[in-house]
Amino acid sequence: MKKPIDMDTLLVQLDRLKLTAIRDQLDTLLDEAARSKMTLREALSFLVTREIARRDERRISMSSKLAQFPFVRELDSFDFEAQPSLDPGQLRDLATCRWIAHGDAVLFLGPPGTGKTHLAVALGREAIRQNYSVQFVTAATLVAMLAKAHADGALDKQLTILSRPKLLIIDELGYLPFEANAAHLFFQLVSRRYEKGAMLLTSNRSVGEWGSVFGDPVVATAILDRLLHHSTVITIRGDSYRLREKRRSGLLQKAGSTLETNSTATQ
């Protein structure tokens, strides 16, 4: 006569093997396997699949926190109809992350509010799903980090830290001009990652304007020479999502009417 299985012992064994998803849902999973009349092999595959799914979920959650994304965005939620200048097929190809494996660069260029950061975060999250490490930082924050490290005599250490993620996302480049020394520090980062670590940059300025952004056309040329060597440049031409929603709600017209009324009253 077979000895009955002691559930407590089984739970302890699952805990020792760190199969926590199976342990936490054991009764539910076994009932589902029984209802579906799974074979032993099918049931084992079913349990293992649930365990892997739980681990992937935890890994993605932890890696997303470490990446410091400003919000959660996915490619599926992007409104491509509102931005007809974009090719959805090209974005889906970027979501395969082959460019990250090769250490290439992606540049999203366009006016504020056209979805550049949404796309950057969405591709960053897809990279995490495919087990790539990601770091997200705004250009202003990055420059401040590099400047502080340089002042503290720890620039090489900071550059090493910023070279570790397989993908470094730099958002909002061009919104604030760089000081001359900051441009040189940024050049050192780009050089350190060149052909080794992928970079994704968003900017409201065309590459032809980067000389004024960096305050030094020579340094800007050197930066672009490395970034554009193996790159995909996507220019978004369209209205701001935020302004479009304001127009739909009538807020822009109301604001305009208020300004006109105030202007007339003061004349």
Image (cartoon, rainbow, N blue to C red):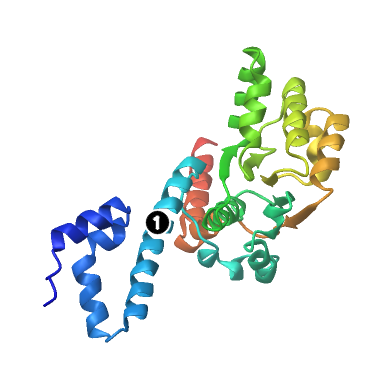
Rate crowding at label 1 as few (under 14), some (14 to 19) or many (20 or more) other CA atoms within 10 Å.
Answer: some
| Quadrant (top left/top right/bottom left/bottom right) for the C terminus | top right
Compare residues 159 and 26 and report the one nearer the observer: 26
Quadrant assignment, res 11: bottom left
Residue hosting label 1: 55
Q: Is residue 14 left or right of residue 186?
A: left
Q: Residue at x 74, y 50 (%)?
A: 104
Residue at image position (77%, 31%) is: 187
Amino acid type at image mark 1: Arg
**Residue 210 x %, y %:** 79, 38
Seen in the picture, residue 206 relative to 76 is either above or below; the reply is: above
**Residue appearing at x 61%, y 41% in the figure:** 165
Q: Residue furthest front?
A: 1
Q: Is residue 143 visible?
A: no
Would residue 249 be visible to someone looking at this image?
A: yes
Q: Dividing the picture into quarters, in which one does residue 219 lie?
A: top right
Q: Which residue is depicted at the point 30% across and 60% down?
A: 21
Relative to 196, is 51 above or below? below
Is 122 situated above or below 4? above
Q: Tag 1's secondary structure?
A: helix
Task: Determine the image quadrant of residue 115.
Answer: bottom right
Q: Is residue 10 above or below residue 156?
A: below
Q: Nearer the viewer, residue 14 or 29?
A: 14
User: Where does residue 3 sit, x and y in percent of width and height?
Assistant: 12, 71
